[in-house]
Image (spheres, rainbow, N blue to C red):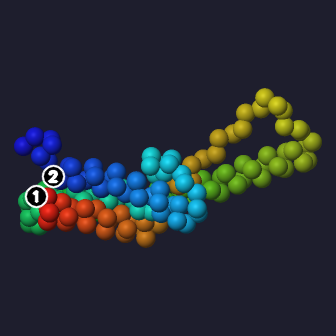
């Protein structure tokens, strides 16, 4: 089987691209701002990580059955990825929010107390990225997206 006939791989890759792309119109509906950078960003609705692993796991279930060792490995892999997306990565994003606010507060403090004006050539400190992980609803939506992509793939294409 060639790589272009590897349906589980193709379903997982399509799930990633679809989930990343659909973030743009969802963000637009919520904010009325079009942000094409969401196509390559982490975090947001739906989770492309969850979409990928759930599409992969569902496709492997179609290919090898629910009783296969390959399905078991994929299912455990999917659970770990989705747990990580809502746990560690989400908390890192929350910490980045607080650190960014502390840095802003410190800069304001220094400027007000010490009277240090901002120099023209002074570099702005880059903020930490706060959108790293996902809320449980984003992981759930990504998981449903991936499962639906595999179901559609195996129902209508394969």
Side of 20 where 72 appears, left or right: left
Q: Which residue is mark 2?
A: 7
Q: Quadrant of residue 50?
A: bottom left
- Looking at the image, which residue is at 67% across and 51% down? 100
151 on left or right of 102: left
* Sooner in the amino-acid sequence: mark 1 or mark 2: 2
Dividing the picture into quarters, in which one does residue 49 lie?
Answer: bottom left
Mark in the foreground, 1 or 2: 1
Between the residue at mark 1 and the residue at mark 2, the CA separation in whole angstroms equals 8 Å
Quadrant where the N terminus sits is: top left
Question: Which residue is denoted by mark 1 in the rendering?
Answer: 158
Q: Residue placed at 47% from the left, 60% from the top?
A: 25
Q: Nearer the viewer, residue 18 or 34?
A: 34
Tag 1 near tag 2, CB within 8 Å:
yes
Of 72 and 136, the residue lying toward us: 136
Q: Residue 38 versus residue 122: which sits nearer the camera? A: 38
Whether residue 138 is visible, yes or no, is: yes
In what element is the residue under mark 2?
Answer: helix
Taking the image as shown, residue 91 lies to the left or right of residue 9, namely right
Q: Position of residue 149 (x, y in %)?
A: 25, 62
Residue under the point 12% across and 46% down:
5
**Residue 80 coordinates in the image, percent (x, y):** 32, 59
- Mark 2 surroundings within 10 Å by alpha-carbon count, few (fewer than 14), some (14 through 19), many (20 or more): many
Q: Is residue 76 visible?
A: no
Instruction: Please provide percent x and percent y for residue 75.
Output: 22, 62
Residue 27 locus on image (x, y percent): 52, 61
Tell me which corner region of the image, top left, top right, bottom left or bottom right, holds residue 81: bottom left
> Looking at the image, is 67 positioned above or below residue 128?
below
For the C terminus, give its image quadrant: bottom left
């Amino acid at each position: 089987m060639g790589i272009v006939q590897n349906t589980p791989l193709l379903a997982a890759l399509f799930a990633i691209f679809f989930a990343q792309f659909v973030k743009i119109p969802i963000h637009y509906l919520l904010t009325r701002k079009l942000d094409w950078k969401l196509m390559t960003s982490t975090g947001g609705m739906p989770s492309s990580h969850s979409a990928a692993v759930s599409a992969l796991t569902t496709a492997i279930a179609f290919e090898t059955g629910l009783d296969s060792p390959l399905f078991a490995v994929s299912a455990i892999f999917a659970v770990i990825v989705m747990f990580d997306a809502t746990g560690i990565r989400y908390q890192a994003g929350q910490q980045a929010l607080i650190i960014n606010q502390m840095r802003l507060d410190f800069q304001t403090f220094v400027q007000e107390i010490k009277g240090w004006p901002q120099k023209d050539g002074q570099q702005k400190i880059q903020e930490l990225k706060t959108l790293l992980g996902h809320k449980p609803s984003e992981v759930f939506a990504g998981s449903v997206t991936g499962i639906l992509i595999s179901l559609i793939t195996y129902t209508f294409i394969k």
